[in-house]
Amino acid sequence: MTPLILAIWYTSIGVRLLLMAALVRRRLALRYPGLSAFLLISLAVSGYMLAVWASGRGMRAYCFAWTSVQPFEVASNAILALDAFWAMTKFRNTGSFGLALVTVFAGLSALAVWSTTRVILPGFNPAMLADRYYTAICLGFLLLSFLFWRSSPMRANARWYVRILIVYFAGDVLGFNLLLVANTPAARAANMLLSMVCYALWAIKMVPAGEAFTPLMNAEERERLFIEAEEMAGMLGGLRKHARKGQPPSALDG
């Protein structure tokens, strides 16, 4: 492992620790439990892998350790994606589409976690398959969810959470394919740097003020809302006027 990769690895651990501390300090850690769980699992995995590398037991021991932590990596990504889905849809009924989407994703996630703990065929490593394709499944799940519910009432933090997570998963998918084409230290460093940028963006964008609602409305919806508000204000004004005159509300008709 090159000094550049090790430096980025250590820096990434530091950024994740800062993000976790920021979530706790801002009282957002329990509001986004999936993100908190993901950070704790990823920090534990990184610490374990660094310890194995520093032990000097060689690449064989490192590869065995990498395979052994893949169930935790896959599970943490599943928790992260489901937490983002909940943050997007917690203020509305997801309906049959949402239920079907979550059911399919949860089933694929359970299969991925289970497969990484088994040797299905001699010489076949399911962890490699999960590492190659599972992040793409997470990306597809989040993209479908966000496209479907993007106009729903949503907290600003939730919107940033999902957007950055889409970039995070997309970067992982692109980075893996880049490594297939050019497995160089520079390619690995670029993949790790993008993940670190996403951690930093979460720390910057997810703030206490972001827990306010930010429903998205187009110009037509805003105009209709203003018209309805003006009509309601006129109706209330009429009710007060007739109440002072002692007339019943039915006098407003016509």
Image (tube, rainbow, N blue to C red):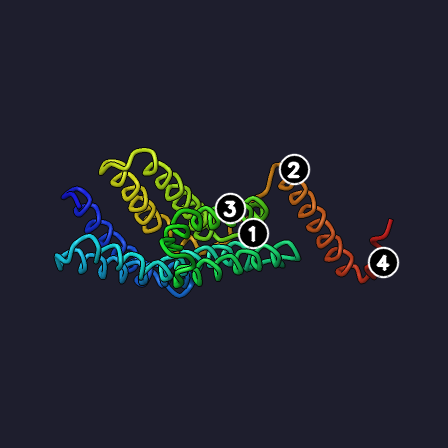
The one of 65 and 47 positioned closer to us in this rendering: 65
- Indicate whether 22 appears above or below 135: below
Residue neighbourhood size for the residue with mark 2, other residues' Cα within 10 Å, grouped as few (<14), some (14–19), many (≥20): few
Q: Quadrant of residue 121?
A: bottom left
In this image, 93 relative to 116: left or right?
right
Instruction: Work out which residue is located at the far front of the displayed protein and give it.
Output: 122
Q: Label 4 crowding class (10 Å Cα cut-off): few <14, some 14-19, many 20+?
A: few
Q: Residue at x 45, y 58 (%)?
A: 112
Circle 1/circle 3 CB separation < 8 Å: no
**Residue that badge 3 annotates:** 140
Labels 4 and 2 touching (C-beta < 8 A) = no
- Mark whose residue sits in front, 4 or 2: 2
Q: Which residue position holds label 4?
A: 250
Element assignment for label 4: helix
Distance between the Cα atoms at labels 1 and 3? 22 Å
The residue carrying pointer 1 sits among few (fewer than 14), some (14 to 19) or many (20 or more) residues within 10 Å by Cα, namely some
Q: Of marks 2 and 1, which one's residue comes earlier in the chain?
A: 1
Q: In the rendering, which numbered label is found on residue 220?
A: 2
The amino acid type of the residue labelled 4 equals Ser
- Label 2: element kind: helix
Tell me the tag on residue 208. none
